[in-house]
Amino acid sequence: MQKLVLNITYRFFIRWFLKIIIGVKFDNAHFLKSEKQFIIVANHNSHLDTMTILASLPSKIIDKVKPVAAADHFGKTRLKGILTNYFVNTLLIQRKRDKENPENDPINKMIKAIDDGYSLIIFPEGTRGEPEQQQPLKPGVAYVLQSRPNIKYVPAFMVGMGKAMPKDDNLILPFNSSLTYGQPTEIKSTQITDILKQIEMDLNELKEKN
Amino acid sequence: MKDILRLDILKNNDLLLIVILIFGLLTFASLLFFVIGKIKPKANLKELKNRTKSWWVMAIVFICATLINTTISYFAIALLSFIAFRELYSVLGFRQTDRRAIFWAFLSIPIQYYLAYIGWYGAYIIFIPIVMFLFLPLRLVLKGDTVGITKSMSVLHWILMLTVFGISHMAYLLSLPEIKGFASGGRGLLLFLVFLTEINDVMQFTWGKIFGKHKIIPRVSPNKTWEGFIGGVISTTIIGYFLGFLTPLNVNQVVFVSFMIAISGFFGDVVMSSIKRDIGVKDMATTIPGHGGVLDRIDSLAYTAPVFFHIVYYIAY
């Protein structure tokens, strides 16, 4: 049921809204169908980012991909949490690590979702920040990849979303923007800093392409 | 509902003739490139083939949107304005504080086209040049960010004039009153304008490619030559003369108006080229393969539409 709802919402309504009204140019994401499991690592400037990535996914796997989101923002009230979990299919985590309750720890939660067979969408910048400005990457994604090194990550870069709907402004304006995917890649080293560097380089490479 | 489902095209032989002509030309171009490709496999025809393919799509979309029935045409032309406006403002770099004013500029698109649809000429002709011209700076001022406000004020209104006011003249052609003994009506005029503008682009390109030697404005557009320009103007004027049956004008007037379309089409093209040069892009977007963005295709129309409209309006209406 949720798969059907997600497909109608994203593949149909949101995809065409983003294409015709906002002016988003989608990259082909069919190659994701042949990947069993992956982590999409993307830059983050706008609420439209998650919508755009979800709208680009092949319909076959759409319910198997969970965007990772901050619980303090999207799970503020119980109802809000339930609704985002259903309609955005999110994995809500808290921003800070929790050593005392391993079950509540964000890294463990992400690893558990991977072990349950889900793919993830992670914005390692953590927050949307100033429009069209890139921020330093947070290490969370590297910890997940470190403990599950056979999972590939897929870099994704979006341009223009921060102009269409920036932080601190809920007015959506049409703006010619785009989503570009890179190649699915395995991590080359198990060092946290090396993994982060590798991801950052891939994102920058996609940025240059635009 | 009846209005939307009505098929206008089958009732008018003149319009049908021009549709056949358009598809004939496209078939000819496709066959030509196919044959050249077979004879000289080394010739680099990829871009020309791409362009022709896109021409097919654009011609079919345009004919469906304008000839099937008039009510849909207003929507289609409004959408064209909307996409062109979005393309142009996206590359011109506005401030974050301009967003509210830009929102109002977007909102003026449906209003302008509604005014064209109901045929209220007085309101239609002043809405963007006067109402929005006065209102947009006001909205910017209310926001209070004065650093760079002059640029935002002028650029925003200029984009609106070019992509919305200019292009909306195409829609108003459809709202012109009927003239006795002139069966093609507004759709005939619209077809005449668009066909001639696009054929002028193609002609200037072709003449320039074959005979081009002396550059006109090398600093703006290195591919534009005197040979291409003059060849284009002459061929467009001749083609316009033969298509005169689509307009209510006499022979001299048709020749004059075709000549003006050829000239102003060239100006629209170089104005847009100079902007692209300024911001350092080759094309506005990558929406249409081989052509660039929507705006790269309709840049000449933004100039020819108002010129053609007001000449015809002055002479015939």
Image (spheres, rainbow, N blue to C red):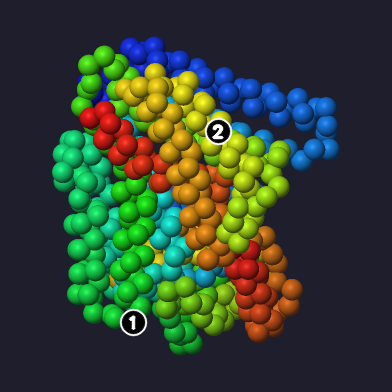
Q: Chain of mark 1?
A: B
Q: Chain of mark 2?
A: B
Q: Nearer the viewer, mark 2 or mark 1?
A: 2
Secondary structure of the residue carrying tag 1 is: loop
Location of residue B270 in the rendering, given as x and y in whole percent from the top left corner: 52, 53
Location of residue A164 in the rendering, given as x and y in whole percent from the top left corner: 38, 63
Quarter occupied by residue B207:
top right
Q: Which one is in front, B236 or A111?
A: B236
Q: Which one is in front, A44 or B117?
A: B117
Residue furthest out toward the bottom:
A100
Residue A26 drawn above or below residue B97 = above
Q: Which of the labelled discs sits on residue B147, or is there none?
A: 1
The amino acid at mark 2 is Ile
- Name which residue lies at 52% across and 32% down: B236
Residue furthest out toward the front:
B252
Circle 1 Cα neighbour tier, 10 Å, few/some/many (<14 / 14–19 / ≥20): few
Secondary structure of the residue carrying tag 2 is: helix
The amino acid at mark 1 is Val
- Name which residue lies at 52% across and 70% down: A43
